[in-house]
Amino acid sequence: MSIIVTGATGHLGRLIVESLLNRGIEPAQITATGRSLEKLADLAERGVATAAFDFDAPAEGVIGAGDTVMLVSGSEVGQRARQHGNVIEAAKKAGAARIVYTSILDASGSPLVLAPEHKATEELLAASGLPHTILRNGWYTENYLPAFGQAAATGTVLGSAGEGRVSAATRADYAEAAAAVLTADGHEGRVYELAGDEAFTLAGLADAFGQALGRDVAYTDVDADAHRAALAGAGLDEGTAGFLVALDADTAGNLLLSDSKDLSTLIGRPTTPLVDAVKSWAAESN
């Protein structure tokens, strides 16, 4: 029996594989999957089993009877519910023991622009009859890497989120929580709301950037139209600009805020502080 990790060519999936290895899981007990075997070659060299696996047409034989499937949500917005359904059906057909799925905060009731596909996937899991665990991941600190680059170049963070607060955590924190669930009993049927311990505003984000960069960084809050225009002026297409403005509206409404301590409980330590994460980015860029 194996732990099948989907999306292991992506940031979170790769970190989940690393977290499993750090917990002492034998490499051969892990199957890292993705569309590109080439991107998994270094894991194969370390003894991790690898397999090509496409959400649009999951290959037979990758998931076996008794396996645990770590379903890392796909990146193709608008296609994810269908794609996830394909994986769930493949797992059911193969006789998988359980599925662990990375969802989004309060997926069943949140008006967050990203929530509907996750809600649909959770419903598919419930209908499948397979034992499963839902990891409702909050915002990733790394989502602010582009803003960090902007701050380094201009000394400014621009947004339209007002005083909205975000309970972000690093991908490594979320990956560690996934590994904890994958390697222990008693998580079947559970839904975990995962979020960082300390929430921050975008003004607080700018302050953390300033500490890491050793310079003043200010947050400039504008209305949605001005934000959209600034993003378009920076070269973003209309769809992307609109999506980012919508996310800031969600932030302003505190839809990325949570007081849940499920994440720190699962990983057995406080979540990574924002300023520590940002300082690591600054060190990597030097």
Image (cartoon, rainbow, N blue to C red):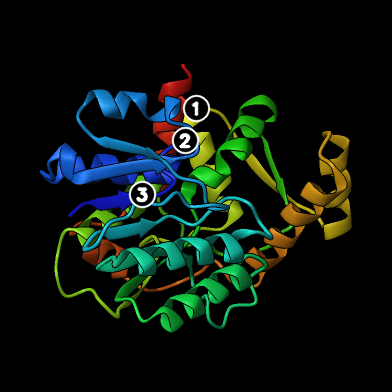
Give the distance between the C-alpha atoms of the residues marked 2 and 1, in whole angstroms. Answer: 5 Å
The residue indicated by pointer 3 is 273
Residue highlighted by disc 1: 214
Q: Amino acid at mark 3?
A: Pro
Secondary structure under the numbered disc 3 in the rendered image: loop
Q: Residue furthest top?
A: 286
Label 2 element class: helix
The quarter of the picture where residue 232 lies is top right
As measured in the structure, the alpha-carbon distance from the residue carrying label 2 to the one carrying label 3 is 13 Å
Label 2 Cα crowd, 10 Å radius (few <14 / some 14-19 / many 20+): some
Residue 265 seen in render? yes
Q: Are marks 2 and 1 in contact (CB under 8 Å)?
A: yes
Q: Residue 211: which numbered mark, if any?
A: 2
Please report the residue visible at 82 percent of the width from the left and 51 percent of the height from the top: 239
**Label placed on residue 202:** none
Distance of label 3 from label 1 (alpha carbons): 18 Å
